[in-house]
Image (spheres, rainbow, N blue to C red):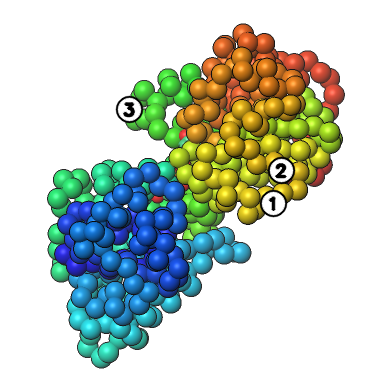
Amino acid sequence: MKLCVIGTGYVGLVGAAIFSDWGNEVIGVDKDASKIERIKAGDMPIYEPGLSEIVLNNIKENRLTFTTSVADGIKDAEIVFVCVGTPQSETGAADLSAVWEVAEEIGKNLTGYKVIVTKSTVPVGTNEKVKTIIRANAKEGMEFDVASNPEFLREGSSVDDMKVPDRTVVGTETAKALEVMTRLYTHLGKPIVACDLRSAEMIKYASNGFLATKITFINEMAQLCERAGADVCTVAKGMGLDRRVGPAFLNAGIGYGGSCFPKDVAALYKTSTDQDYDFSLLRGVMEVNKAQKDHFVFKVTRLLGKNLSGKTLAVLGLAFKGDTDDIRESVSIEIVKLLRGMGAKLKVYDPEAMDNAKKVLGDVSVEYCKSSYETMEGADALFILTEWKEFSGIDLEKVKSLLKEPIIFDGRNMLDKEAVQKSGYTYFAIGKRTNGVEKIDSRKSDQRSAFLTNGNGH
Ligand code: UDX
């Protein structure tokens, strides 16, 4: 099939690469000419395992080309995918200006029947508006259909997620559009959820809202486990083996971040209030997620004090999760900023996100290190903030020889509690009683609520 993919961000670039790898002829469109040049040279604008090989291979096979012109991109395409960004606006709703702009350009340049598919995450009713805009800009009598085909890929594993999706959601209004879309996906042998436009749009938000809620539930359980003397990892394992619950997305931590969950939960909540309904569960999810990092930082202040001047802290992990260089809405970055705000000097390391982190953290009180171990030299405590697999394998004896004090704050439960404590560390994790928690609990001083309400918590 001949396809056009507009937008070369995570969804667009990975989409164009995989569609071409399936044997389709794909044209990727982006108005940023320098980005297109980089991609063509095999220099991917995002870090995504396996992506550059697929892109370069399909460029070589002449199945994948790029242009900056929407008109050229859509001319011969049977399907046009809209994969532009839909960031969060000030109201919490998705900012759809890029979608409207592209819809207008598609309308102006339509030369024959095509299915115009929105793959970007967009709120209910967007595809209907896309149709209206295209219609208003297209030549009289021009035929086209719109479709909603939300993408569920995760950063860091997007290539595999797209190659082997659990399901494909296709919202259409006509049998013709459904037939075209089915032709593209049927070879996967995975369920195709064929439905109306509005339900397709809602499925994407419902999925992300539910997953964010699942993480938030286990984070709340972690608070409870820590106080009650249970271990949240064991509790999650016991829950996850029930097939109705499932083991995925039950890792307690410092809260969810990234370019999707925070914005999608806010947008879904905004959709509910727009419909005169208060989706109070989602309101709770947003509040709890915001507080999760404060609970973590609170523990730091209980051990090290609220004035961290003169302290050097080693930080492993800056990306919003492992296997990505993305720092958008990264809770690690927020925690680094909080610690720096209290006077600490930070020595940081991330396997892929250093360049991006430099852009937002700058140089003040932050030293960028070349390895995990370099961060620890002379530091007063070690923080693990992103779930990169390599951090779970750190050599505890070596770490102890490098740190000034053997203190570890493990925000992702990466280390084995028994092994760490046996090695003589003061250890803090999420949702488990550790010797660190016992140490600060034995002190009588200030209370958590005081910290969270006096302006130090955010
Ligand atoms: C998410 C959805 O998973 C994906 O389907 C959608 O298309 C885009 O949004 P992504 O943002 O790439 O994907 O990352 P994901 O792996 O879902 O993680 C999101 C955040 O939740 C990260 O900050 C991660 O650290 C956190 N998380 C995830 C947890 O804290 N615990 C978990 O158990 C899982």
Q: Residue at x 65, y 53 (%)?
A: 360
Q: Residue at x 85, y 24 (%)?
A: 445
> Vertically, is 71 above or below 285?
below
Query: What amino acid is labelled 1 in the image?
Result: Gly
In contact (CB < 8 Å): disc 3 and disc 1: no
In contact (CB < 8 Å): disc 1 and disc 2: yes
Per the image, label 1 sits on a secondary structure element best described as loop
Q: Distance of mark 1 from mark 2, alpha carbons?
A: 7 Å
Residues 351 and 142: in front is 351
Neighbours of disc 2 within 10 Å: few (<14), some (14-19), many (20+): some
Neighbours of disc 3 within 10 Å: few (<14), some (14-19), many (20+): few
Query: What amino acid is labelled 3 in the image?
Result: Arg
In the picture, the disc for residue 372 is: none
Q: Distance of mark 3 from mark 1, alpha carbons?
A: 46 Å
In contact (CB < 8 Å): disc 2 and disc 3: no
According to the picture, the residue beneath numbered tag 3 turns out to be 243
In the image, residue 122 lies at what x, y percent? Answer: 42, 62
> Vertically, is 251 above or below 33?
above
In the picture, the disc for residue 362 is: 1
According to the picture, the residue beneath numbered tag 2 turns out to be 366
In the image, residue 413 lies at what x, y percent? Answer: 55, 25
Q: Is residue 368 visible?
A: yes
Q: Distance of mark 2 from mark 3, alpha carbons?
A: 45 Å
The residue most toward the top is 422
In the image, residue 415 lies at what x, y percent? Answer: 55, 21
Quarter of the image with the C terminus is top right
Residues 119 and 220: in front is 119
Residues 139 and 194: in front is 139
Q: Residue at x 42, y 20 (%)?
A: 238
Question: Left or right: 355 with respect to 426?
Answer: left
Per the image, label 3 sits on a secondary structure element best described as loop
Quarter of the image with the N terminus is bottom left
